[in-house]
Image (spheres, rainbow, N blue to C red):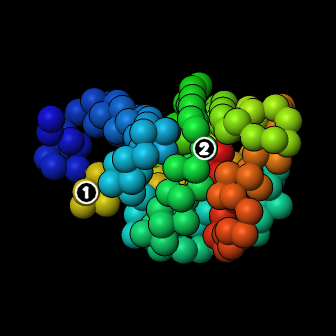
Amino acid sequence: MTLSHEYPIADPRVGRLQDRAEIGDVQLRYATGTDSHDWELFRSCFADEIEVDFRDGFGQPAVRVSADEWVKETAPRMESFTATQHMITNLVITFADDDQATCVAYVRASHHLPNSTGDSDQIVYGYYTNRFRRTSSGWRIVRVKLTTLWMTGNFGIFGSALGPGEPSRRIGSPSTA
């Protein structure tokens, strides 16, 4: 498949549609990479340096970090759940210019981990406000922000996910939510 960053498109309306499709694909790769533990696919969503903001709902400060570090910190947490399912829908994409965009998308992030603290499931409902930049490799996330509207289930499974005695994570949230 040839992507919009690989050749000029004569009609700007067609180019904008291609850009929207590529940004939507990045959002879906984010969810698919997380749930399938395909960390190369997950990493392909990001520019080399990103801002991660999961303050809302998780209380972690927003941080600027390398994408490689973000993936390194996310992978063990997600792999410690029995299953996760991140559904990303209702994408609204706006463009600041030809090379910068924002995508606001609903998320329902389900996390499953049988445990002794109660319910085995925890679900985050909210939306991502992700900023994108066009790079030589295509559209990439430069800022990922999760806004949590509500949660259901056992929030304690995030603490149980890595098991007792595991060091707390320094970056982002208990999850990619």
Name the one closer to the observer, 43 or 152.
152
Q: CA distance from mark 1 to mark 2?
A: 31 Å
Q: Dot 2 surroundings within 10 Å: few (below 14), some, or many (20 or more)?
A: many
Image point 15% across, 35% down: which residue? Answer: 1
Image point 48% across, 72% down: which residue? Answer: 69
Judging by the rendered image, the residue that carries numbered circle 2 is 81
Q: Check the image and name the residue furthest to the front.
A: 116
Above or below for 3 versus 145: above
Image quadrant of residue 26? top left
Image point 48% across, 44% down: which residue? Answer: 34
Label drawn at residue 137: 1
Q: Amino acid at mark 1?
A: Ser
| SS at circle 1 | loop
Query: Is residue 149 rendered to the left or right of residue 173?
Result: right
Whether residue 75 is visible, yes or no, is: yes
Location of residue 68 in the rendering, given as x and y in whole percent from the top left corner: 42, 69
Identify the mark nearer the N-term, 1 or 2.
2
Query: Is residue 117 rendered to the left or right of residue 125?
Result: right
Location of residue 151 in the rendering, given as x and y in whole percent from the top left corner: 82, 36
Q: Amino acid at mark 2?
A: Phe
